[in-house]
Amino acid sequence: MSFTQSLVILLALIAASSFFSMAEIALAASRRVRLRQMADDGDPRADTVLHVQEQPGYYFTAVQIGQNAVAILGGIVGEGSLTPYIADALYWIDNPVVLRHLSAALSFIAIISAFILLSDLLPKRIGMSQPEKFAVRLIRPMQACVALLKPIVWFYSRITDLVLRVSGMPAQRDDRVTPDDILSLAEAGAQSGLLARNEQRVIENVFELDSITVASAMSTRDRIAWFNIDDSDTIIRARITEQPYSTYPVVQDDLDHVIGYVDAKDLFQRALKNEPINLRDPALLHKVLVVPAQVTLAEVLDQFRQVHEDFAVVVNEYSMVVGVVTLNDVMSTVMGDLVAMDEEEMIVRRDDNSWLIDGITPIGDVERALGIDTLPDEDSYETLAGFLMVMLRRIPKRTDTVTVGNFTFEVMDVDSYRIDQVMVTRKTPAVE
């Protein structure tokens, strides 16, 4: 066999091995979501690939049979064909034994290198770049190979299935998409520039709703505008002018006895029509949803959906009202920086290593802002003020400080035992 003939046969074997390598990696790396989209767009080959992914045993068996057969043939053809020509090139070596062994070794290295580079590494790199595209292009030729090798494929597939059953290993891949998968894709999209960082943060916030308590989104007790059931028309009109909100709780005597709520639009309609406003009117007073402070935002959304409301009163374990939450509050938590907030921010970053934080800020928000995993005795408090009280074992005073790890918390302002502002300073700058 001439050198040209040997070279043509080797190139043909390398091309066949490249085909099997690319077919293997393309099927394994193809994403079902993308394939489903291609199938919906009218490509029947994508639907075929999806079916093969569900039962890939015969497919991969045919790939391995083809790759191994080609590799064996390549070794036989290459070593027998290239060794004489390499020996001729090494004519200056006088020792025939050394020449024979060295020629065989160089022939072996050349064949192995060609197969590794051209039939394994290169096709797999190409197949990984666009797996769905190559999977649909190669599925029909691979089905022909499976049909051609069906008896052998059936035999080895049955042996493989038996081994998997005996060992207890799964025979099918798990294509379930988990929240971690989605978050990883969002992070990859943000790093590549295809997804804005704010959009990535929105996706993360959606998956955090089941871990963030309602305290992180609610308006706290001292910021609630409410009416007493016996308030006069004059008082009601004055309050909605001074404190314009969309919803107002209605109480009996004090805030801890909420009996319902009124919608601002109903009040405005009566005010514009110069009609008297009486909170005992059943047409104005609505039944209020009450939720415990320990529930998550995901649970609050579920309760909003069940009762068809978008407003709830939040109470603690002693049935004391600690705040109110609206659907807009939850959505603002999800949207983050994409929406503009008219209210003063509870956490203001002064520079890279210091923050000015309101004392009633939920401790979870403080931890996220500072990049802290947990704080000491975290189950004993819900707000930054509660954290300082637990650490100091008394009511904090102005200039009191608490140091935890790399952070120092200094009380800046106290108003009637209420901690208004806390300065948090990072002692050692964070390493980027």
Image: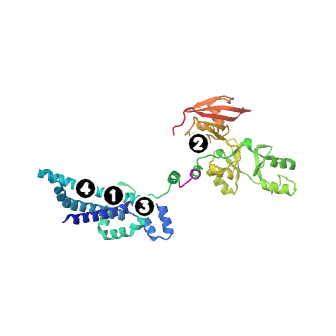
Whole-number angstrom distance, CA of label 3 to CA of label 2: 38 Å
Name the residue beneath numbered marker 1: 120
On the question of residue 230 being in view, the answer is no
Tag 1, which secondary structure?
helix
Q: Is residue 322 covered in magenta? A: no
Q: Nearer the viewer, residue 382 or 423?
A: 423
Nearer-N-terminus badge (3/4): 4
Is the Cβ of the residue at disc 3 closer than 8 Å to that at disc 4?
A: no
Residue 244 in view, yes or no: yes
Q: Is residue 346 left or right of residue 176?
A: right
Q: Label 2 amino acid? A: Arg
Q: Amino acid at mark 3?
A: Pro
Q: Residues within 10 Å of mark 4 (few under 14, many from 20)?
A: some
Gap between marks 1 and 2, in whole Å?
46 Å
At 68% from the left and 35% from the top, the residue drawn is 421
Residue 366 picture quarter: top right
Between marks 4 and 2 in the image, the one whose residue lies nearer the viewer: 4
Label 4 SS: helix
Pointer 3 residue: 131
- Whether residue 248 sits left or right of residue 161 in the image: it is right
Q: Which residue is mark 4?
A: 110
| Residue at the far front in the pictured view | 92
Q: Position of residue 282 (x, y in %)?
A: 81, 56
Q: Earlier in the sequence, mark 1 or mark 3?
A: 1
Amino acid on which disc 4 is placed: Ala
| Residue numbers of the magenta segment | 194-200
Residue 233 image point, x, y percent: 86, 50
First in sequence, mark 1 or 2: give its number. 1
